[in-house]
Amino acid sequence: MADVKPVILPLSRRLVAEGLGTALLVTVVVGSGIAAQRLSPDDVGIQLLENSTATAFGLSVLILVFGPVSGAHFNPVVSAADWLLGRRTGSGLRGRDVAPYSIVQFLGGISGAVLSNLMYDLPAIQISANERSSGPVLLAEVVATVGLVTVIFALVRSGRAVLVAAAVGAYIGAAYWFTSSTSFANPAVTVGRIFSDTFAGIAPTSVTAFVLAQVGGGGLGVLLIRFLYPTVAGGPEDVTAHVASDRRGSDMRASDARDA
């Protein structure tokens, strides 16, 4: 199989997968947050346990469902990291696709929050009043994002991409608890959570600092991966084009290989 290159699916199909996957991820995060507040109104610890458990399992499932199509980034930082880390080997996301991926991820994040509100008979558009702007919380977002990027690309670059879904779900579930920010680690999810006025939400005034912390954490994660994994296991031909996906099947039709 060494002479078979990764098959890249049409951009339109990948964008639908990224937008839908990000929307469903935010639906899981916000929907379980609303349910947790209603089920355990007097115990924030139990609310966080309910919210983190649903997110960990939901994220793992979404990666398994959408990974073979788009790579299941659901996160502009991950998309940018995939491009940066793959430039030298010709693997990873193409540079011209980073912006379209990010746009549909942000739109998906907002849509997911609106869907959650509607499912729980709340106003479709809410604006969170939950301020998250302290120095320790922003430091936590840097740490959370460094960890996320490191987990994903350590597995991908060492030939263990099949483990990404379980590992990322487990990491995010844990990071809910060991970071003071509850580990957003994702600009698209952060923007989406503006539209949830629950404990899972974030006030618009906190978003810019949060996103900057996430971008900084993503950059540090890329540097760490380049240091720890300077080469890719098996060589460029064995690298999947996107996270947690393997599209090297030689029986795929030629039409699937064309990038719209």
Image (cartoon, rainbow, N blue to C red):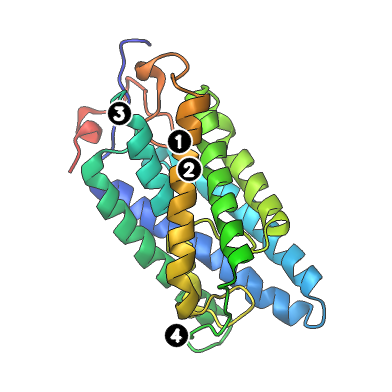
Vertical order, 162 against 183 (above or below):
above
What's the CA distance linking mark 2 and mark 3? 29 Å
Q: Residues within 10 Å of mark 3 (few under 14, many from 20)?
A: many
Image quadrant where residue 88 sits: top left
Query: Residue 40 appears at what percent x and percent y?
Result: 79, 78
**Callout 4 touching callout 3 (CB < 8 Å):** no
Q: Is residue 244 visible?
A: no
* Count of all numbered marks drawn on residues in the image: 4
Image quadrant where residue 234 sits: top left
Q: Is residue 118 visible?
A: yes
The residue that mark 1 highlights is 223
Q: What amino acid is labelled 1 in the image?
A: Leu
The residue that mark 2 highlights is 220
Query: Residue 173 appears at what percent x and percent y?
Result: 68, 53
Q: Residue at x 61, y 73 (%)?
A: 200
Q: Earlier in the sequence, mark 4 or mark 3?
A: 3
Horizontal relation, residue 108 to residue 169: left or right: left
What's the CA distance linking mark 4 and mark 3? 39 Å
Q: Residues within 10 Å of mark 4 (few under 14, many from 20)?
A: some
**Callout 1 touching callout 2 (CB < 8 Å):** yes
The residue that mark 3 highlights is 7
**Callout 2 touching callout 4 (CB < 8 Å):** no
**Callout 4 touching callout 1 (CB < 8 Å):** no
